[in-house]
Amino acid sequence: MRISRIYIMTLFQEKSENMTLIAQNMRTIAIVEDDVTVRSELNIFLKENGYRVIAPDRFDALEQYFDQESADLILLDVQLGGYDGFEICRKLRRHCSTPIIFVTGKNTEADELKGLMLGGDDYITKPYRLPVLLMRIKKALEHSEGSRDNGRLCVDGVTLDIVFGQLSCNGQVWELSKKEQQILYYLFMNHGRIVSRDELIEYLWENKLFVDENILNVNFSRIRKRLEGTSIAGFIQTIPKMGYRVGKD
């Protein structure tokens, strides 16, 4: 029986479309690791488990790198041959909400706490088991995707709607100014850690030398005044001599 060329072409086209769809749905993991052997092993392992992998071999301009290369999650070492992974994380967190998992040989409790406070989503020490790393990656991706559904961020039942510029909880809705929304967006994206005053000012105004800090105080006062007498009156917390965070503690 002869098979027509049209039939063969149709099958080929359907296969190509399916492969394209699979590629589009693949999550991209960035490996920021200076050990070539470790980087290569992780690259192979993640690809075998259905991930697309990117792996920069320079660490002096990672903010610009991730502006050009899109990643769904970053695996970040701390000791990068002269570069400090903690400092890289701090800089990335100014403008990047991508989940970051530290994968490092620095295994003290102080190191782990520092990594998490600087914006890391998880902290894994070497040596590690690959199945455990894979589970942590899946968990971080699920949490990240769930928290950003339809342009909304949610922390402890409080929702920030980025599209409409609103804060809501238990059926109550509060309208936000542009600057108020920016403040809350940064605090929501860094939920789980304390954001210092200087860090927040640097995020809101690129040149903090020309910023009147009272402007920040005024914006916080306005937000808190709206929330007075509600179930989330203490949602925005000021930590003396440290900074700010959001959550129902």
Image: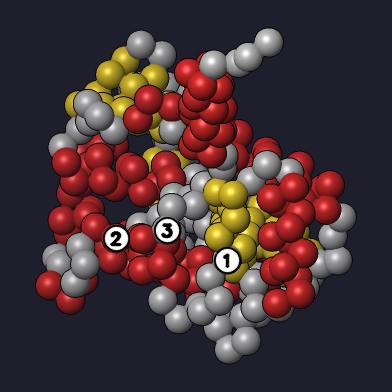
Q: In front of the other: label 3 or label 2?
A: 3
- How crowded pointer 1 is (Cα within 10 Å; few <14, some 14-19, many 20+) is rated as some
Q: Quadrant of the rendered structure where residue 189 is?
A: top left
The residue shown at (44%, 71%) is 62
| Residue labelled with disc 1 | 55
Q: Amino acid at mark 2?
A: Tyr
Q: CA distance from mark 3 to mark 1?
A: 10 Å
The residue shown at (81%, 67%) is 126
Task: Kindly state the secondary structure of the residue where label 1 is placed.
Answer: loop
Measured as percent of width and height from the top left, residue 23 is found at: 54, 39
Q: CA distance from mark 1 to mark 2?
A: 27 Å
Query: Which of the pair 231/154 is nearer the observer?
Result: 154
Measured as percent of width and height from the top left, residue 13 is found at: 49, 26
| Residue labelled with disc 2 | 203
Marks 1 and 2: CB-CB under 8 Å?
Answer: no
Total labels drawn: 3
Task: Kindly state the secondary structure of the residue where label 3 is placed.
Answer: loop
- Pick whichever of labels 3 and 1 is earlier in the sequence: 1
Q: Which mark is residue 69?
A: 3
